[in-house]
Image (spheres, rainbow, N blue to C red):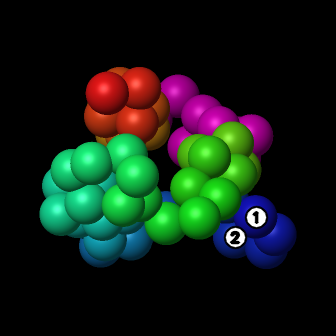
Amino acid sequence: MTGRQDLSDAEWAVISGIFYILRTRAAWPYNIDEVLEALADACRTEADPRLSELRRRRAG
């Protein structure tokens, strides 16, 4: 992620919604792991509990 490193609540809601709607791992967007890695690398989102929740859902 370049530029702005923090996400708004609305952006978190969209990402979280993707994970909720696409409950099966096979249905998730291609390269979703890269998105999670980018969020983990961003200084303002790496410690965000919402990222931990997304990772938990990804692990299934």
User: Could you tell me which secondary element the residue under label 1 belongs to?
Assistant: loop
- Position of 20 with respect to 5 (left or right) is left
> Which kind of residue does numbered mark 2 sit on?
Arg
Residue labelled with disc 1: 1
Q: Is residue 10 above or below residue 19?
A: below
> Which kind of residue does numbered mark 1 sit on?
Met
- In this view of the protein, which residue sits in the foreground, 33 or 13? 33
Residue 44 visible to the viewer = no
**Mark 2 or 1: the one toward you:** 1
| Image position, residue 28 (x, y; %) | 41, 59
| Image position, residue 60 (x, y; %) | 31, 27
Q: Is residue 35 above or below residue 2?
A: above
Residue name at image x 41 percent, y 26 percent:
59
Q: Main secondary structure of the magenta part?
A: loop
Disc 1 residue crowd, few under 14, some 14–19, many 20+, Cα 10 Å: few
- In this view of the protein, which residue sits in the foreground, 57 or 3? 57
Residue name at image x 69 percent, y 42 percent:
37
Q: Are marks 2 and 1 in contact (CB under 8 Å)?
A: yes
- Position of 46 with respect to 34 (left or right) is left
Residue name at image x 62 percent, y 46 percent:
33
Magenta stretch: give its range. 40-48
Q: Is the N terminus in the top left, top right, bottom left or bottom right quadrant? A: bottom right
User: Could you tell me which secondary element the residue under label 2 belongs to?
Assistant: loop
- In this view of the protein, which residue sits in the foreground, 42 or 35? 35
**Quadrant of res 48:** top left
Residue labelled with disc 2: 4
| Image position, residue 34 (x, y; %) | 70, 52
Queried whether the magenta region covers residue 4, the answer comes back as: no
